[in-house]
Image (cartoon, rainbow, N blue to C red):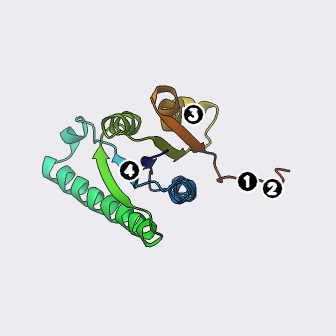
Amino acid sequence: MYKKLLVPLDGSELSESALEHARAIASGCNVPEVVLLRVIESIPPEAYVETREDVIRNAQKRARASVENYLSTLADDLKKEGIAAHAVVLSGKPADEILDYAKKNRADLVIMTTHGRSGPSRWVFGSVAQKIVRHCAIAVLIVPPGGCRTGESRG
């Protein structure tokens, strides 16, 4: 059924709750590939006016190395469970890069969390998950904040 799962992560513990669903689907459906994706937002050109370009470049390299290490650790954990996973790091606008990667790399399912923002904070910050759901041409599984609470009382 599924051949490639795409799991966008933002480095937060909340986003990692999508991994339990990716594990279950990958194991249960014998998915041959799980991609852990992180998008590093690009530094806007106006930032270069205030800061030396080499300082920004070095900061971006350190950030990328940190993200690559983070994703590699998560991918290694999945591999120990028999799940074929690898990490991809991109730069740009998160929603745009996720949509582009899913399309170009023929993902079958995107599994991601939402931060559960509502009201003015959602209007100000927007929602990557909302953009993915609206514009993605493949299935998207959205994990609510706190993960799946099946069988629990929501009091």
Bin the neighbour count of mark 1 within 10 Å (Cα to Cα): few under 14, some 14-19, many 20 and up: few
Can residue 126 be seen at all in this image of the molecule? no
The three-letter amino acid code for the residue at tag 3 is Arg
Residue 36 x/y as whole percent: 40, 54
The CA span between labels 3 and 1 is 23 Å
Bin the neighbour count of mark 4 within 10 Å (Cα to Cα): few under 14, some 14-19, many 20 and up: many
As drawn, the label of residue 59 is: none
Labels 1 and 2 touching (C-beta < 8 A): yes
Tell which circle, 4 or 3, labels the residue nearer the N-terminal end.
Answer: 4
The CA span between labels 4 and 3 is 23 Å
Q: State the residue in front, 91 or 133.
A: 133
Mark 3 element type: helix
> Residue at (33%, 39%) from the top-left corner?
101
* Residue 17 location, quadrant: bottom right
Q: Which residue is mark 1?
A: 149
The three-letter amino acid code for the residue at tag 1 is Arg
The CA span between labels 3 and 2 is 27 Å
Q: Give the tally of numbered discs.
A: 4
Bin the neighbour count of mark 3 within 10 Å (Cα to Cα): few under 14, some 14-19, many 20 and up: few
Q: State the residue in front, 55 or 64.
A: 64
Residue 123 x/y as whole percent: 55, 29
Tell which circle, 3 or 1, labels the residue nearer the N-terminal end.
Answer: 3
Q: Which is more foreground, mark 4 or mark 3?
A: 4
As drawn, the label of residue 37 is: 4
Mark 1 element type: loop
> Residue at (44%, 72%) from the top-left corner?
80
Left or right of 101? Residue 24 is right
